[in-house]
Image (tube, helix red, strand yellow):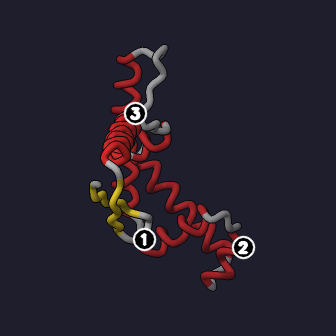
Amino acid sequence: MITIKYFDGEKHIEIEVAEEFAESYREICREERRIDKREKRHSAVSLEQLEEHGCEIVDPQSDPLETMIERKRGEELRKKIKGAWSAFTAEQKNLVRLLRQGMGIREIARKLGKSHTTVLEMKKAIKKKMENFLP
């Protein structure tokens, strides 16, 4: 007789079993560990998970040079937008946030306690700043 240990999901249990059963149990445990390792190595990863980790999925039919140019343009555009955003006043940033939420000019005017004409002028000033940063 041989004592083996196993985990029943809550606690470890020791029992005595015949030698041939113990050998079969050990072989089953080894095979389960090999399968677990194989599954970890070959687990499927979604494209969304790759993109979340910064991997860019590129169409294999696309031109690598065009892809590089587009990536560079995107980086430059992000820098320009950040520059424009930093030039906005707190009030202008708040207006942009409200507009992005889908609020209308009159609704924003009521929320901010301003006339709709004032909000339109603020929007125009934001647009002008953006045009200066993104010619």
Three-letter amino acid code at the position of disc 2: Arg
The residue shown at (44%, 30%) is: 57
Q: Residue at x 35, y 55 (%)?
A: 17
Q: Specify whether residue 33 is in view.
A: no
Residue 88: give x, y in percent of width and height.
Answer: 41, 65
Q: Which residue is mark 1?
A: 10
- Which mark is on residue 126? none
Q: Nearer the viewer, mark 3 or mark 1?
A: 1
For marks 1 and 2, the one nearer the N-term is: 1
Q: CA distance from mark 3 to mark 1?
A: 29 Å
Whole-percent x, y for residue 46 in the image = 49, 38
The furthest residue to the left: 2
Q: Amino acid at mark 1?
A: Glu
Near mark 3 (Cα within 10 A), the count class, few <14, some 14-19 or many ≥20, is few
The answer for how far apart the CA atoms under marks 2 and 3 are is 56 Å
Amino acid under disc 3? His
Q: Classify mark 3: helix, strand or loop.
A: loop
Please identify the quadrant where the C terminus is shown.
Answer: top left
Residue 42, label in figure: 3
The crowding category of the residue bearing disc 1, from other C-alpha atoms within 10 Å (few below 14, some 14 to 19, many at least 20), is: few
Q: Is disc 1 placed on a helix, strand or loop?
A: loop
Question: Would you place residue 82 above or below residue 33 in this image?
Answer: below
Decide: few, some or many residues near mark 2? Use Cα within 10 Å; few <14, some 14-19, many ≥20.
some
**Which residue lies under the disc numbered 2?**
106
